[in-house]
Image (spheres, grey):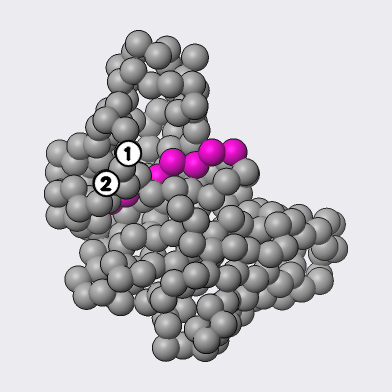
Amino acid sequence: DTEVTQTPKHLVMGMTNKKSLKCEQHMGHRAMYWYKQKAKKPPELMFVYSYEKLSINESVPSRFSPECPNSSLLNLHLHALQPEDSALYLCASSQVDFLAGGGYEQYFGPGTRLTVT
Amino acid sequence: SQQGEEDPQALSIQEGENATMNCSYKTSINNLQWYRQNSGRGLVHLILIRSNEREKHSGRLRVTLDTSKKSSSLLITASRAADTASYFCATDGRYGNKLVFGAGTILRVKS
């Protein structure tokens, strides 16, 4: 199974709402990622988890709160978002790069299209 | 922040023609990868080339890497309408798990 699933596919939320995005993979990957992608732009890395621990936070505002409850699941909790946070949120997974220079392909989910009103 | 620049930004060709996309990057890398994204969907990994490799093939895809010029190219031969998508290069630096994507090339293959 080489699939990464994301729910929901679409989400509309107000600026005072709290919502969560979910991501799941069953490939045994121990690295998981959140990316944000605005229209006609490349994906931008937000967070990286390695072995269920947060290893990279790309200075993301605290209104985005990631969580990795186990090796297969990754959540992104959203609170008090702004309209400019509307974007496609992509989850990905890969093997962990133990040695600098390892480099592994990342498997992406289909994304959650988020609209903040 | 974006590491790479890609050109052309958009490319429109006829089915059966070859498509070439270029990627330039700024800092030293360990690996360079190419991904495809169909409209509004997730990315699909196409090929990974390591910094000590110069050329790699996968089916109709050919990737070259020139680390002295900090550039890479993706060639798709005998293109098909189904190849219509955005194509991104992505580089990693010291930490292989952290990918930085180029701006992307939008490819349209007309049937």
* Relative image position of residue A102 (x, y in whole percent): 29, 75
Tell me, yes or no, if residue A22 can be seen here. Answer: no
Q: Residue at (34%, 60%) from the top-left corner?
A: B98
- For mark 1, does the 10 Å Cα neighbourhood hold few (<14), some (14 to 19), or many (20 or more) residues? few
According to the picture, the residue beneath numbered tag 1 turns out to be A60
Residue closest to the eye, B83 or A33: A33
Q: Residue, x 39% and y 67% (percent of image)?
A: B92
Residue B93, given in percent of the width and then of the height, sits at: 36, 69
Dominant SS of magenta comes to strand
The image shows residue B4, relative to residue B74, as above or below, that is above
- Give the x, y percent position of residue B104: 61, 57
Three-letter amino acid code at the position of disc 1 = Val
Q: Which mark is residue A57?
A: 2
Determine which quarter of the picture holds residue B71: bottom right
| Secondary structure type for disc 2 | strand
Q: Is A75 left or right of B60, judged from the image as shown?
A: left
Q: Say which element carries label 1.
A: loop
Q: State the residue at coordinates (53%, 50%).
A: A42
The amino acid marked with disc number 2 is Asn
- The quadrant of the image that shows the C terminus of chain B is bottom right
Q: Which residues are magenta?
A: A32-39
| Left or right for B49, reference A61 | right
Coordinates of residue B110 in the picture (x, y in percent):
83, 56
The answer to whether the residue labelled 2 contacts the one labelled 1, judged by CB atoms less than 8 Å apart, is: yes
